[in-house]
Amino acid sequence: MPFTVPRAGAAQGSRPRWWTELPLIAAVYAAYSAGRLLARGDVSTAVDHGLAILHFEQRLNIDFESPLNDLFTANAFIGIPADFAYASLHYVLTPAILMWLWKRRKASDYRFLRTWLLVSTVIGLIGFTLLPTCPPRLLDASYGFVDTMAQYGSYGWWGGDASAPRGLGGLTNQYAAMPSLHVGWALWCGVSLWRHGRSVWAKVGAVGYPLAITLVVMGTANHYFLDAAAGVAAMGLGALLAGPALRLADAVRTRLRPAQEAPVVSRNAGVPANVGDKCETSARERERIPRQQGRGADRQRTDGAADDGGRGAGAGTGGRGATATGGAASTAGDGAPAAAR
């Protein structure tokens, strides 16, 4: 079977390289951390936003964070694991599932899910900037909330002022509560496990993990119920924008590709290629064809020389016959005068 040169664009659906994916994800995570840090806003404004959310929930009787915080505060065997989950799973399980998708799933599935996560994170950063919100745990104690991260701080590596490592709480934005990306990222993990997990445990985790994180963020008084709902909405909007973002990235990649492939085209320029209607002759085939033509030319020259030699031999034989005939005639002529004499 002849070796054919692959056409341009054949690798568009190939799996992204890890050395391009890792810097991209690291850059988005750095933007996420820096955005939380820079978008602190005015504390009084953040407190006003937090109280407005709480009062709105109370009017609708959807302030589920209040009884959950009482439960987590009164029971250490619930509150301590919840604090560990809040401080770690957000940063561990999400990248682990992303790496699993990159390694095991189709390239198109991975690209969509990765883009969905990145776009939703950017939407969350916009929310942190436009609507700084004080979480329930930082409200005045008269509102009845207890900061479980501070209450159980001696059991973990976090300090009393944030879920960050002890002593680094001042480097985080504690007023970035709306929307809750803890809930948003957990929802992304759940959808990824549900769609691409094969085992029963994957399906259980797909449902249980987002629900558990939603309870954790409210029970530890880090988010209101509406923060969690806004996190789900941010992920929904990110899912809608992931497709257009991918098409835009593909258009940019296609626009840049001709400049990268120009040397390949110039090396193949001017070579007669077609051996079929839609198949291009490879360099290996082009090398083989002149050798075959050369062998044919040598064979023709050999055959021609043999024909010429045969004709020359025939001519020589004819000459010798003619000479012999002439000799006979001459003998006969000599005999005629002799007879006359």
Image (spheres, grey):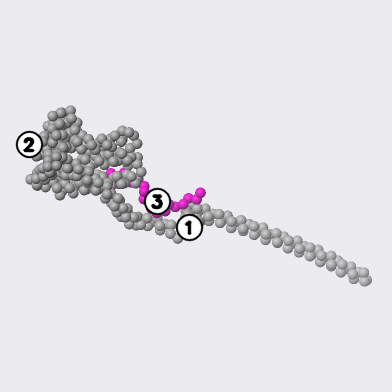
* Residue most extreme to the front: 60
| Dot in front, 1 or 2 | 2
Q: Tell me the quarter of the picture where residue 177 sits.
A: top left
Question: Element under label 3?
Answer: loop
Residue for point 32% across, 40% down? 195
* Residue 262 inside the magenta-drawn segment: no
Among numbered discs 3 and 2, the one appearing first in the sequence: 3
For the C terminus, the quadrant is bottom right
- Pointer 3: what residue? 10
168 and 193: which one is in front?
193
Q: In this view, does 300 lie to the left or right of 311?
A: left
Do labels 1 and 3 touch, CB within 8 Å? no
Span of residues in magenta: 1-22
Residue 293 visible to an observer of this rendering: yes
Looking at the picture, how far across and down is residue 94, in whole percent?
25, 39
Among numbered discs 1 and 2, the one appearing first in the sequence: 2
Check disc 3 and give the amino acid type.
Answer: Ala
Q: Distance between the residues labelled 3 and 2?
A: 62 Å
Among numbered discs 1 and 3, the one appearing first in the sequence: 3
Check disc 1 and give the amino acid type.
Answer: Ala
Residue for point 53% across, 56% down? 290
- Pointer 2: what residue? 141
Residue for point 64% across, 57% down? 303
Looking at the picture, how far across and down is residue 203, in whole percent?
30, 36
- Pointer 1: what residue? 273
| Dot in front, 1 or 3 | 3
* Residue 20 inside the magenta-drawn segment: yes
335 and 268: which one is in front?
268
Q: In this view, does 190 lie to the left or right of 221?
A: right
